[in-house]
Image (cartoon, grey):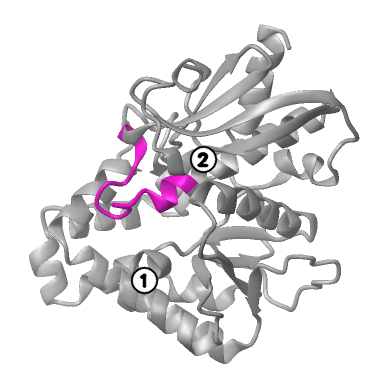
Amino acid sequence: MQTEQFRQIVEEARSAPSPLNTQPARWRRKGDAILIGCDPEAVLKVSDPNAVAAGLACGMAAEATILALSSRRMGAVFTDQWAQDDRDTLPGLRMAGRITLEAQTDTDPLAKQLPLRFGHRGPYEPGPVDLYGWTRRDALLITDASRRDWLADLYDQAMMTHLRRPEVRHELLSWLRIRPRHPRKRYDGLDRAALQLEPRAAFKARMALGPLWRPAEMFGAVGKVTSEAEQIRSSAVIALFHRPATDSPVTAGRALLRLLLEATKLGLAAWPMGVLTADDAARDEIARTVGLDPERRLLQVVRLGRAKSRPGRMARRPLEELIV
């Protein structure tokens, strides 16, 4: 694999999603292998203290890399190295996994969905969706309105609990790019376009989560700014993504990206509802209510629906930051 081809593969793989678009995955080419590392500076240390969400993101980036290789008919074998907590192979990074190149192979059918996938916060187009062809066995699909309403209310409750911690608000604001001239707006984090916020709404959110938190909470304004109940209720389906409790986040992340690409194939856009798995009480309530097997772990809740239009390009780090 030549240097330019490797750069093209990383350019395609960097489209993989991550919490708050932090993009923790890093790539290095080493002989006939590609190493995937996790940058601790891109881990949400408050909201994701055990780096589960970061591990999922690195797993999705690894799977996106394998799909980019597959589109070129290049075979690959993945070795999950997350549990080793190796910080030496890639100094300053935690090893997530190793992709070893193999002989020519057939193209993975999901590879062509990689450039088509995009996130959409909602609201979504009304009406049912056709789930014919859905093959995922690691997702419980919520399609009835009553349980979507329940999850919408639970989400808003969990978000308010989350945001009452000052360190959470500080971390969130550090990754929002809703100031018009934020220097990192083109590279990472979430801007107004990604959040689908008008300028006035973005200003209110920045004030309510920042200097005006106390009066905003006192008068009930925070809930109005942060609520996503409308978007959640407009979704056609909510996927409860679960994996064996023994899975590492990286292995689970590979499966999560494939779930999102299957949704893309069905014409559905997705948006994660990460606070429902970051909050222990909310995650346990969902698992108990839907009867999830105790040997399975709920890792992500994703709302899905038809988007009216495709948003602009999501901010992406330059290759110089990603290839180490």
Residue closest to the eye, 90 or 261: 90
From the image, give the main secondary structure of the stretch colored magenta.
Answer: loop
Asked where in the image residue 141 lies, by quadrant, the reply is: bottom right
* Structural crowding at the residue carrying mark 1, measured as other residues with C-alpha within 10 Å and reported as few (<14), some (14–19) or many (≥20): some
Residue at horizontal 91 percent and vertical 35 percent from the top: 106
Residue at horizontal 36 percent and vertical 28 percent from the top: 87
Query: Could you tell me residue 36's position as x and y percent?
Result: 53, 29
* Structural crowding at the residue carrying mark 2, measured as other residues with C-alpha within 10 Å and reported as few (<14), some (14–19) or many (≥20): many
Residue closest to the eye, 304 or 54: 54
Q: Is residue 192 visible?
A: no
Real-space Cα separation, disc 2 to disc 1, in angstroms: 28 Å
The amino acid type of the residue labelled 1 equals Ser
Disc 2 marks which residue? 58
Q: Considering the image in quadrants, where does the N terminus appear? A: top right
Query: Could you tell me residue 44's position as x and y percent?
Result: 31, 46
Disc 1 marks which residue? 227
User: From the viewer's perspective, is 269 left or right of 23?
Assistant: right
Task: Report the span colored magenta.
Answer: 41-55
